[in-house]
Image (spheres, helix red, strand yellow):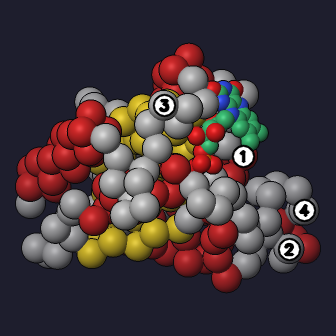
Amino acid sequence: MTTDHPLVVGLGGSPGHPSVTNQLLLSCLARLDAETVSFGGDELGQLPIYGAAPVETGLQTSTVAESLVEAVRRADAVVIATPGYHGGMSGLVKNALDHLEALRTDARPYLDGRAVGVIVSAGGWQAAGSALVSVRSAVHALRGWPTPFGVTVNSAEQRPDGDGRFDERVEGALDVLAAQLAQFLAWQR
Ligand SMILES: Cc1cc2nc3c(=O)[nH]c(=O)nc-3n(C[C@H](O)[C@H](O)[C@H](O)COP(=O)(O)O)c2cc1C
């Protein structure tokens, strides 16, 4: 990081309206003293499926893909929020991470040097845990630094109220995650 104004990019991988996942992402980003850019389910849903068309056809490029890649290129930290789908991360999140292949030859390839906070909302605890591990494994492969603390929410029991606030345990977990991201950003400076 070269400035005192860090950029944190959020990826929220649920197509839901409303979405517990996307609300958790926004609540986390709002806790950070940083510039934030968020790609929610609507934006990630506009990404072409990575690799579905040969690169030569040009069909792999899209405005959203270019914005996503450029934002992550500039990012000092990333927050990834996903619903648990069949025990892992959603396709929207995995596809977005695949698009980061465009950063392969950068001076900071992929997620290199960036703290990555991970948030999961699933309909049960088992998928919450396994989806958390699936995202962390991908982040490691992309050379990112998953924060020690991840936020897992069981949406069958823990849902936001009308103001987007969760119960004390979830709000406390988001505080811890935001604090760890802030600590990593301070270390970078
Ligand atoms: C395609 C799909 C697969 C899902 N798979 C699981 C699962 O394996 N385990 C689980 O506990 N919940 C599963 N769920 C439930 C979601 O993880 C849960 O409702 C989540 O909180 C949705 O988040 P959202 O409100 O952000 O969309 C699945 C939901 C969908 C739509």
Q: Residues within 10 Å of mark 2 (few under 14, many from 20)?
A: some
Tell me the CA gap for discs 2 and 1.
19 Å
Front of the two marks 1 and 4: 1
Asked if labels 4 and 2 touch by Cβ distance under 8 angstroms, the answer is yes
The quarter of the picture where residue 45 lies is bottom right
Which residue sits at x=43%, y=50%? 160
Asked if labels 2 and 3 touch by Cβ distance under 8 angstroms, the answer is no
3 or 2: tag closer to the N-terminus? 2
Q: Which mark is residue 77?
A: none
Residue placed most toward the observer, 141 or 158: 158
Asked if labels 1 and 2 touch by Cβ distance under 8 angstroms, the answer is no
Q: The residue under label 3 is which amino acid type?
A: Glu
Q: The residue under label 1 is which amino acid type?
A: Gly
Q: Residues within 10 Å of mark 1 (few under 14, many from 20)?
A: some
The answer to whether one can see residue 142 in this image is: no
Is 131 situated left or right of 113 in this image?
Answer: right
- According to the picture, the residue beneath numbered tag 1 turns out to be 91
Q: Secondary structure at mark 4?
A: loop
Q: Which mark is residue 53?
A: 4
Residue placed most toward the observer, 8 or 175: 175
- According to the picture, the residue beneath numbered tag 2 turns out to be 59
User: Relative to 130, is 162 above or below?
Assistant: below
User: Relative to 148, is 26 above or below?
Assistant: below
